[in-house]
Image: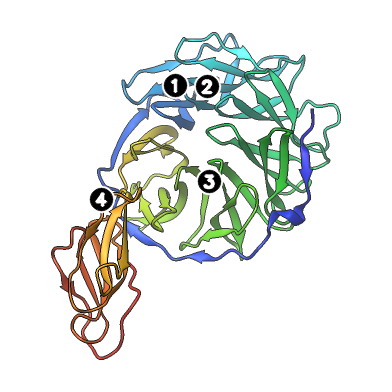
């Protein structure tokens, strides 16, 4: 089975606006060890409470899964194979399983303890780097008869045990990422023998099967893709500088997070993006883990050590708790850690209304309930904006004559006048 291709002209290629950002403090940040034992721990992935990662000791390699709720840490039985490059969705882990005769993709239910089952078994298969979301698994396949110069992307439905080729050309395809609900897959397609000309593609599952679309133009350098089903996020190089980009999974306007220095390796969950950024700690240039909030345009720095922290994978719980797992280089070994924090909740809306006469500031819950009037003056109060932590509101008011900038607590108390001059001050932002 082969997917439907959509021409690049429909991808909505457009300039990418650079976003200004606010620096936030990650509230309640806790960092703890997943595994810092002997050997190399790397390539962590997270879904809910479960973390999978590769553990290599003395030439052997296995996939382990860690429960963040209980602290238990268990190996997936290898069956005399070498297991690498895993992913997890709910209780199901997928792994790359290497034997003397094949490289296969196996699924393993961590809730029941297995056994591991090879997906779409084929003699002498050469498959690697699986990603899973819901009942959808995607992987790189280098063992197809008509392949070109590199791997192709295959989608596999666990329920129907059906494999579908998403790519079929002479160009190599890398790094598939599956949305949590399994409805969208994103990956990178490169020109032969180079990573300097790589495009981002996505495929959406519909009634007629998978439909693919090219999201970025040729002649540019992109990679490290991920998707939450609505957006595809990826790294891109502009004028020699690596930044984080994203755009709708079905094509549309590209957005760019422009920060000092290089950023790469993004992971997206909900409205948050985790990524690696080159930072300076105690005068030492190193790689740290950052999180960007798409809703509030706020960047949070999670790590501040002198070690290099890379390979972030992100999960946001239904209650808004942020969990990021990552790899840290500690001496000659790599270890896996997890960070958790709670960003400010955006469950209220602030706005200006003349419903009671002149313009005043009001707030309400995101569902329209809980209306509260926050100001009550003869002047005109307009253009409210929340502080990054959601504790205060800044706005413009003519209560003392001309328009000046004021701030107040989220409940309307604690009024502070911030500007005092003859000019007109409006439209504040934190």
- Above-or-below relation of 117 to 370: above
- Relative image position of residue 176 (x, y in whole percent): 63, 36
Question: Disc 4 or disc 1, which is closer to the eye?
Answer: 4
Q: Which mark is residue 161?
A: none
CA distance for labels 2 and 3? 21 Å
- Residue at 45% in and 25% down: 39
Question: Disc 3 or disc 4, which is closer to the eye?
Answer: 4
- Residue at 41% in and 49% down: 291
Residue behind mark 2: 93
Task: Compare marks 2 and 3 and give the one earlier in the sequence.
Answer: 2
Residue behind mark 1: 65
Under tag 2, what secondary structure? strand
Task: Compare marks 1 and 2 and give the one earlier in the sequence.
Answer: 1
- Above-or-below relation of 115 to 151: above
Viewport quadrant of the C terminus: bottom left
Under tag 1, what secondary structure? strand
Task: Compare marks 1 and 3 and give the one earlier in the sequence.
Answer: 1
Residue behind mark 4: 370
**In this image, 296 relative to 16: left or right?**
left
Q: Quadrant of residue 29?
A: top left
Under tag 3, what secondary structure? strand
């Amino acid at each position: 089975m082969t997917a439907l291709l959509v021409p690049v002209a429909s991808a909505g290629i457009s300039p990418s606006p650079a976003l200004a950002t606010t620096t936030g403090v990650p509230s309640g940040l806790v960092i703890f060890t997943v595994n810092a034992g002997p050997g190399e721990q790397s390539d962590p992935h997270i879904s809910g409470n479960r973390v999978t990662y590769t553990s290599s000791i003395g030439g052997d390699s296995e996939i382990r899964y860690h429960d963040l709720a209980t602290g238990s840490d268990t190996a997936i039985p290898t069956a005399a194979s070498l297991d690498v490059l895993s992913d997890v969705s709910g209780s199901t882990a997928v792994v790359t399983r290497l034997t003397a005769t094949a490289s296969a993709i196996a699924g393993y239910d961590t809730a029941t303890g297995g056994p591991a089952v090879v997906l779409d078994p084929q003699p002498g298969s050469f498959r690697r780097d699986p990603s899973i979301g819901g009942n959808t698994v995607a992987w790189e396949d280098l063992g197809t008869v008509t392949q070109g110069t590199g791997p192709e992307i295959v989608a596999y439905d666990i329920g129907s045990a059906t494999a579908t080729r998403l790519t079929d050309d002479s160009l190599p395809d890398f790094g598939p990422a599956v949305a949590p609900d399994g409805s969208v897959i994103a990956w990178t397609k490169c020109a032969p023998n180079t990573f300097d000309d790589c495009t981002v593609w996505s495929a959406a599952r519909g009634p007629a099967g998978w439909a693919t679309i090219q999201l970025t133009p040729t002649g540019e350098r992109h990679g490290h893709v991920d998707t939450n089903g609505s957006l595809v996020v990826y790294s891109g190089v502009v004028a020699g500088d690596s930044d984080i980009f994203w755009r709708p999974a079905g094509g549309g306007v590209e957005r760019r997070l422009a920060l000092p220095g290089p950023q790469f390796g993004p992971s997206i969950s909900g409205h948050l993006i985790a990524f690696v950024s080159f930072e300076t700690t105690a005068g030492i240039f190193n790689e740290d883990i950052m999180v960007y909030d798409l809703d509030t345009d706020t960047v949070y720095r999670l790590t501040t050590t002198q070690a290099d922290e890379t390979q972030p994978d992100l999960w946001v719980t239904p209650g808004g708790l942020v969990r990021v797992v990552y790899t840290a280089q500690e001496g000659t070994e790599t270890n896996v850690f997890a960070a958790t924090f709670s960003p400010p909740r955006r469950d209220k809306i602030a706005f200006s209304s003349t419903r009671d006469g002149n313009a005043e500031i009001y707030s309400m819950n995101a569902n329209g309930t809980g209306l509260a009037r926050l100001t009550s003056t003869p002047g005109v109060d307009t253009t409210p904006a929340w502080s990054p932590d959601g504790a205060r509101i800044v706005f413009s008011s003519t209560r003392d004559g001309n328009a000046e900038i004021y701030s107040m607590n989220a409940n309307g108390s604690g009024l502070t006048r911030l500007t005092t001059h003859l000019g007109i001050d409006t439209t504040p932002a934190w």
